[in-house]
Image (tube, helix red, strand yellow):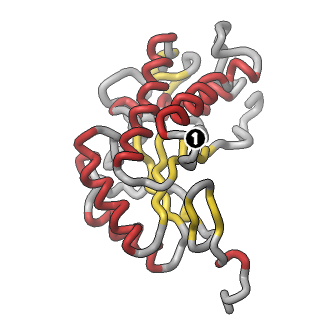
Amino acid sequence: MSTEFNPVFSRIKLGPIELRNRVIKAATFEGMAIDNMVTDALIDFHKAFATGRVGMTTLAYCAVSPDGQGAPNEIVMCDAAVSGLRCFVDAMHDLDVAASIQLGHAGPVGIGVGGPALSASKVFSKTRFKNTTPADAYQIQRIVDDFVSASELAVESGFDCIELHFGHGYLISNFLSPKLNKRKDDWGGSIENRIRVHLEIIKECRKQVGFDFPISMKINSADFQKGG
């Protein structure tokens, strides 16, 4: 297929950055971050998409804190990870590809590292085989702060875009679902309350990275569950 006049392959602005085309590799779990750090295998995996001429590739899934891990062998955002993340970004930029990073907290579907399985309300965690812990106000604020710190590290590492993971049963999605969020406080009930944590994270991350830095969100439009 000729790409000469196909708009999919034309350059496009995404906020302040310009992508060489409109093809973006979505964030899909790679399982290549041994000891929660960037590896050569992880970089090579994304370089294959870069040489295939995507406009931007997305590094997935990077936990904003140790207790936010969704699976083994994924990156946990911390100071020690920055040097590897910079190598990742440099490798993508060398191939004229923008680099995005997906940030999230797995919550009730996490693997249980360094803390309880947090959720909006108590539910049974199929990954931990026990009930989750409803996050209190302190824990909610800590999670917001973790997203902000992770965003700061992403910018420090040179990423062109941040993707906030708000979907698919992970912690922030858990607050949005009327089936899973049975809270009676300011974080539950109405849609305005259930989406409050989303808006807090977006607001505080935006303050941290600046108005012009691209921020995207991954959010599911349906739970595919009765009452969701």
* Count of marks placed on residues: 1
Q: How many other residues sit within 10 Å of disc 1, few (<14), some (14-19) or many (≥20)?
A: few
Measured as percent of width and height from the top left, residue 9 is found at 65, 78
Q: Residue at x 44, y 39 (%)?
A: 151
Q: Residue at x 61, y 29 (%)?
A: 198
Residue carrying label 1: 211
Residue 210 shown left or right of residue 40 in the figure: right
Name the kind of residue labelled 1 in the image: Phe
Is residue 127 in sight in this rendering? Answer: no
Residue 47 shown left or right of residue 192 in the figure: left
Q: Residue at x 47, y 22 (%)?
A: 118
Measured as percent of width and height from the top left, residue 153 is found at 36, 42
Residue 223 shown left or right of residue 87 in the figure: right
Above or below, 6 relative to 58: below
Give the secondary structure at mark 1: loop
Name the image quarter holding the C terminus: top right
Outermost residue toward the top in this view: 184
